[in-house]
Image (spheres, helix red, strand yellow):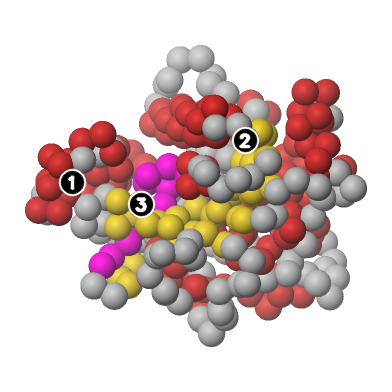
Amino acid sequence: MGRVGLVLGAGGVVGQAYHAGVLAALEHDLGWDPRTAEVIVGTSAGSITGTLLRSGVPASELAAWSVRAPLSTEGALMEQLFGREHPQFDAFDAAQLLRRPLSLPGPQMVRRAVTRPWSFRPVTAAMTLLARGTVDIRDQLTALREVEDQEWPQDPLWICAVRRSDGRRTVFGRPGTPDVPLHLAVASSCAVPGYFAPVKIGNDTYIDGGAHSPTNAAVLRDCGLDLIIVVSSMSAPGRGVVRDIHDASRWHAGRLARREACAQRAGGTDVVVFRPGLEEQAVMGDDFMSSATVTDIVQQSFLAAGAYAAKPEVRSLLAGVSC
């Protein structure tokens, strides 16, 4: 078996449901255990899924909890962290957030734009300048309180966030980055700008890693992996005309995911990307914080991922992870 990296992208509550369905399909159809990935990269919702995998929860149990099926002993952590009910959040209205006044960029942001224009991302900068959310994500996610005393897992888990002062991506858990508590790394990665309050770690504050990229597969460049499996719940095939901000965000996420995948392939690493098709999009809807259709999302993504993995060109790439 080759060295496999697993990238779990952003996507809120519906994104976690999509992760559960896709990973359960890979476990069921290929006999591959996502917990054995050489390195797991998590962004926003993906940071929670990645933490659960590294904590020993099998993909099948992630799916079972999502559809309220009985859990095994290995899946008991899911109930301990989340109870038996899906978390409930206020509806996410991206258009409303964008109508709020932006903050002025600070000197660090301006300096980075001037001195490193090739790495400056205007969309990321705009996300850091959104009015601060007022809800502390740690109060909303019981799981974060439950893992406050949990150490970083021994196997690599890289959690992506964005430093608000200059819009720079930070990858917690990667060698060479500051040591931070696991629960704060996860909280910062999930701090959707304008919706949740930024998370303070040391002298800096951080927001959702999806502000830089909904997948952040680029952080695995030069890692010597044979295959990277990307689960990108926010990117999807276009519906033709971009009709609203939700279509625009899917288009943007898809463009970044394709660019990252192409760069990895150019470097000699095979990449398989799972993204929602039109049927999954219809079930997921436009409010990624809604838990109303979680069961349907898990079921639809399980079936679609299995069908996609069975395609000859995809199956050949995944052959190295099959048991």
In the rendered structure, the answer to whether residue 291 lies left or right of residue 289 reads: right
Q: The residue tagged with tag 1: helix, strand or loop?
A: helix
Residue 44, x across and y down, in percent: 49, 55
State yes or no: residue 209 in magenta.
yes
- Cβ–Cβ under 8 Å for marks 2 and 3: no
The residue type indicated by label 1 comes to: Arg
Q: Which residue is mark 2?
A: 269
In the rendered structure, the answer to whether residue 211 lies left or right of residue 73 reads: left
- Residue located 45% across and 51% down the image: 91
Quarter location, residue 312: top right
Q: Which residue is mark 1?
A: 112
Mark 3 or mark 1: whose residue is earlier in sequence:
1
Q: Which residue is mark 3?
A: 169
**On screen, 279 above or below 164?**
above
Spatial distance from mark 3 to mark 1, Cα to Cα?
12 Å
> Which of the two discs, 2 and 3, sits closer to the camera?
2
Given residues 192 and 116, the one toward you in this image is: 116
Given residues 196 and 295, the one toward you in this image is: 196
> Which of the two discs, 1 and 2, sits closer to the camera?
2
